Image (tube, rainbow, N blue to C red):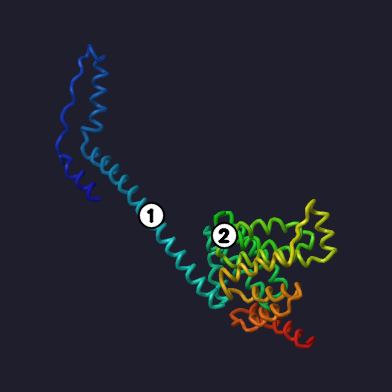
């Protein structure tokens, strides 16, 4: 605005513009052409008010564009700061086990284009689906909803290890509603995304744990499911309990006691390998794990039942 005012003050107020140069009638054309030239010049220079307004408008347009850029940049910074604030709130609620509050918070931003918000919303949707009070119909809707959020997160940022991880988890969950054939058909895709998540973040214990579950699932696959896998793939997916155990231990090394289910599966895998001593060690840790979520409580119960089975046999 200061620039515009200086421009305004520098213009003559009420003074006539200097007369333009005369063109010789013979050199530049007829007398009519000379008169036309003078008239056109007078439209601008002969009307200082119009000229000043035109120049002022140009200055204001330039200043408006500069202001727009400043405001746009400020808005982008503000939006980024707001997203960071939401993520901090979401992570706090997740760590506190406030599943429903977390879902309510993130659901307000379901149209977001931010991958970090979207994969967290996928996780929250899945966690709500896992609650015992969630009806079967609502659970199914939430499972498919979670897959959509995870897919969008991955589309927005293919370098997000969490987006790969939660997309794989959600694909697996949807398989529960689409039949064993679909679940087996998606097996390699699920494994691929888990492996990509580990590649992007080798310190993410959860992704390593999930690869262990993948191996455990195919190690204990019943014969009829193996027949289906053989029909779908030239080389059907397969694994061993030893391979699963390696991933579970690796996850525990990265982040000790990070997840009650990892402790439970270490115990169950040792049971499959007929090592009761180590099975009892890990099952006891699972039973004594502080219950922050409903899943933790379910795992405590399962671990206690398995340990009771030990006592009864002994």
Q: Is residue 92 above or below residue 308?
A: above
Rendered location of residue 196, percent (x, y)? 61, 56
For the point 76% across and 75% down, the residue is 274
Residue linked to disc 1: 73
Q: Secondary structure at mark 1?
A: helix
For the point 61% across and 79% down, the residue is 293
Q: Is residue 306 above or below residue 88?
A: below
Q: Is residue 156 above or below residue 42?
A: below
Q: Is residue 27 above or below residue 112?
A: above
For the point 23% across and 47% down, the residue is 3
Residue linked to disc 2: 161
Depth check, front residue: 276 or 45: 276
For the point 59% across and 82% down, the residue is 290
Question: How many C-alpha atoms fall within 10 Å of the one at disc 1: few (<14), some, or many (≥20)?
Answer: few
Which residue is most to the left? 15
Depth check, front residue: 99 or 6: 99
Q: How many marks?
A: 2
Horizontal side, residue 64 vs residue 142: left or right? left
Rendered location of residue 215, percent (x, y)? 71, 64
Horizontal side, residue 94 vs residue 214: left or right? left
Rendered location of residue 184, percent (x, y)? 76, 59
Rendered location of residue 279, percent (x, y)? 70, 78
């Amino acid at each position: 605005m200061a620039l515009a005012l200086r421009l305004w003050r520098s213009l003559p107020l009420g003074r006539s513009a200097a007369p333009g140069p005369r063109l010789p009638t013979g050199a530049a054309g007829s007398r009519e052409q000379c008169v036309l030239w003078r008239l056109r010049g007078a439209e601008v220079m002969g009307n200082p008010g119009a000229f000043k307004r035109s120049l002022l408008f140009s200055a204001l347009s330039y200043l408006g564009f500069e202001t727009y850029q400043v405001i746009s940049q400020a808005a982008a910074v503000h939006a980024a700061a707001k997203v960071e604030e939401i993520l901090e709130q979401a992570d706090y609620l997740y760590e506190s086990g406030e599943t429903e509050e977390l879902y309510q918070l993130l659901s307000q931003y379901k149209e977001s284009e931010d991958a970090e918000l979207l994969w967290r919303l996928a996780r929250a949707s899945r966690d709500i689906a896992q609650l015992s009070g969630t009806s079967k119909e609502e659970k199914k809707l939430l499972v498919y909803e979670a897959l959509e959020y995870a897919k969008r997160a991955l589309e927005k940022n293919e370098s997000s290890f969490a987006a790969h991880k939660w997309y794989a988890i959600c694909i697996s969950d949807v398989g529960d509603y689409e039949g064993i054939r679909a679940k087996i058909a998606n097996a390699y895709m699920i494994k691929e995304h888990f492996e990509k998540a580990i590649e992007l973040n080798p310190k993410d214990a959860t992704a390593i744990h999930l690869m262990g579950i993948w191996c455990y699932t195919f190690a204990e696959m019943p014969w009829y499911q193996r027949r289906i896998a053989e029909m779908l793939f030239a080389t059907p997916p397969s694994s061993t309990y030893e391979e699963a155990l390696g991933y579970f231990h690796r996850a525990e090394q990265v982040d000790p006691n990070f997840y009650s289910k990892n402790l439970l599966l270490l115990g169950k895998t040792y049971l499959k390998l007929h090592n009761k001593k180590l099975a009892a060690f890990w099952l006891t840790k699972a039973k004594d794990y502080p219950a922050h979520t409903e899943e933790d409580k379910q795992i405590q119960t399962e671990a206690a039942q398995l340990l009771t089975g030990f006592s009864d046999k002994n």
